Amino acid sequence: MRTFTIAALQAAALLVAAPALAQDREGWPTSLTIGTASQGGTYFIYGTGLAGLITENLGVNASGEVTGGPVQNATLVETGDHQIGLVTMGPAYEAWVGESELAPGVEHKNLRALFPMYQTPFQAVALKSSGITSVADLQGKRVSVGPAGGTAATYWPRFFEINGITADVSFSGANDAVGQVKDGLIDAFAFAAGVPIAAFAQIAAENPVNIFGFSAEEATKILEARPELAAFEVPGGLYQGYPDPQGTVSLWNFAVAHKDMPESLAYEITKLVMENNDRMKQIHSTAAETIPQNVDKDTFLPYHPGAVRYFEEIGVTIPDELKG
């Protein structure tokens, strides 16, 4: 009788598996770019960490790129300039129906959802010496709302209008904005990012500051006018000097890809992220919400077929109308 050593059996298994592996990787790029946002914000940390995870595990040289944020990311994926983009679902919906501020009239029908990320709450920060303690206090003040094209830059002017506030709005990256607050060049920085926001944590550790969201009355007006948003409570203890929870509003974030991404690649990226939540939380604590149970937070954007295959394999149902 013919006998086989363990080494021979392992070699035979590799030979059998090799054609399947080659087939699974058909059409994969050698590199891919993930659109994030400005340095100092959560997207940049999350996206560059995600890129590292993909590079280490899938053999594709992935990198995170600084962008203006979700509005720009949606268009960069739509055009194929970026393979993956991080988006909040408000700007993503506007891009989907052709109402993007960056590309008005262009329906972004190439976008496909990969996986849920986390919620983005809206908060503002000002030096205590400014006397600014609330959104209402921003009336007539100089306020940065983050980089042009980002979620904060899109929504904060809308929030001001809804609540009858007139502010002198400017645009800048998160790190630049907190520097401008410290230097007295602006009065406040109103932003949106997964918490804790790195730039807020930095300025709170170095300066006496006021960090605030919306009053119950302000939030109610916003939720009535913008149904894509949700009420949110920022946990206490995230920033120095702020032990108590704080109310505000938020948007969900998703990672999206172009519809032409190879199905096997979309499958492997989705699987990698969904099955390595501890590693994702090491990248940023917001990834505690990067779990399969949150796929239902997407109500309009079709999922990539590779993502659909993964979620259905683990027993998560994707509605037929959201199968891309």
Image (cartoon, helix red, strand yellow):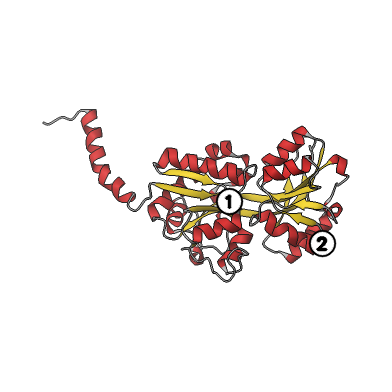
Please indicate, yes or no, whether residue 33 appears anywhere in the rendered image: yes
Give the residue displayed 24% in from the left and 42% down from the top.
16
Helix, strand or loop under label 1: loop
- Where, quadrant-wise, is the N terminus in this rendering? top left
Cα gap from disc 1 to disc 2, whole angstroms: 29 Å
The answer to whether 284 is drawn above or below residue 71 in the figure is: above
| Coordinates of residue 82 in the picture (x, y in percent) | 48, 54
Is 187 displayed left or right of 291 in the figure? right
Which residue is under mark 2?
163
Estimate how packed mark 1 is, as few (under 14), some (14 to 19) or many (20 or more) residues with alpha carbons within 10 Å. Answer: many
| Coordinates of residue 115 in the picture (x, y in percent) | 52, 52
Q: Do callouts 1 and 2 mark residues in contact (Cβ within 8 Å)?
A: no
Give the residue displayed 73% in from the left and 45% down from the top.
234
Which amino acid type is marked by label 1? Thr
Which amino acid type is marked by label 2? Asn
Q: Residue 17 falls in which quadrant of the image?
A: top left
Tag shown at residue 67: 1
| Coordinates of residue 136 in the picture (x, y in percent) | 85, 54
In the depicted view, which residue is nearer to us: 322 or 59? 59
| Coordinates of residue 79 in the picture (x, y in percent) | 48, 61
Give the residue displayed 81% in from the left and 47% down from the top.
187
Question: Residue pushed farthest left?
Answer: 1
Q: Residue 74 falls in which quadrant of the image?
A: bottom right
Estimate how packed mark 2 is, as few (under 14), some (14 to 19) or many (20 or more) residues with alpha carbons within 10 Å. Answer: some
